[in-house]
Amino acid sequence: MKQRLLFLGPPGAGKGTQAELLAERHQLLHLSTGELLRAEVKAGTALGQEAEAVMARGELVSDALVLAIVRSRLEGHTGGWLLDGFPRNLAQAEALDGLLAELDQRIERVLLLELEDGVLIQRLLSRGRADDNEAVIRNRLVVYQEQTAPLIDHYRQLGLLCSVEASGTVEEIAGRIVASLTD
Ligand SMILES: Nc1ncnc2c1ncn2[C@@H]1O[C@H](COP(=O)(O)OP(=O)(O)O)[C@@H](O)[C@H]1O
Ligand SMILES: [Mg+2]
């Protein structure tokens, strides 16, 4: 099975849920930049203080800050990994390429979780995180379309992209993901 993966898709598509499940079942390192940033905010670190207001608006925190977080976790890790919420724009994708070249590793597959906007918004509203109110959700979807969606073509051109229908139950989606990683 492929062991070095990116999860791509809009907020609410289920990246975190599926990434956590897959990581646990296949002993992969799960790196969610959103989770790591929220932990920094909670701990009140300098980094967290810098990120908090940006996250509350649904915008992206600085590429340098996020890259530093990812770098610190991937350096020294030799096994498989699964990145969720990173890269989120082309600059981050290029920075990741540079980091992986240094580590002599490469992305084996990019899983795009696809789901229609209406369902995404319903899922996010029922989740109720601090940045899950309607105005911020709309902004996160705009930021996704403008900054993150261009990564779809980028990874398609590299022959790494695999689309997965992200509707249905957690286990149904997990089944589709595993099937797409073993072909
Ligand atoms: N790679 C990243 N670059 C910049 N900001 C990020 C990144 N990852 C997470 N964030 C910040 O954390 C917030 C929440 O991210 P995340 O938990 O991944 O949301 P979701 O999974 O709902 O898309 C984002 O709206 C953004 O402010
Ligand atoms: Mg998430």
Image: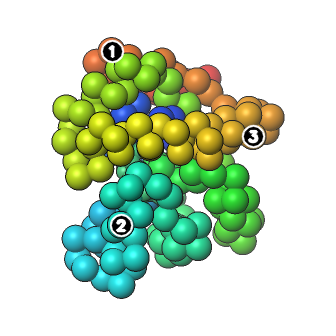
Front: mark 2 or 3:
2
Disc 3 within 8 angstroms of ligand 1 (CB): no
The residue beneath circle 3 is 154
Q: Using the image, determine if residue 70 lies above or below residue 86.
A: below
| Element under disc 1 | loop
The amino acid beneath tag 1 is: Gly
Of callouts 3 and 1, the N-terminal one? 3
- Between 167 and 135, the one lying in front of the other is 135
Residue 37 vs 131, above or below: the answer is below
Between discs 2 and 1, the one toward the N terminus: 2
Q: Nearer the viewer, residue 141 or 177?
A: 141
Mark drawn on residue 168: 1
Residue name at image x 29 percent, y 50 percent: 131
Q: Residues within 10 Å of mark 2 (few under 14, many from 20)?
A: few
**Which residue occupies 62% across, 27% down?**
162
- Cα separation, mark 2 vs mark 3, equals 30 Å
**Residue 16 appears left or right of 74:** left
Task: Specify the farthest residue to the front.
Answer: 135
Rendered location of residue 9, percent (x, y): 51, 35
What residue sits right under mark 2 in the picture?
A: 53
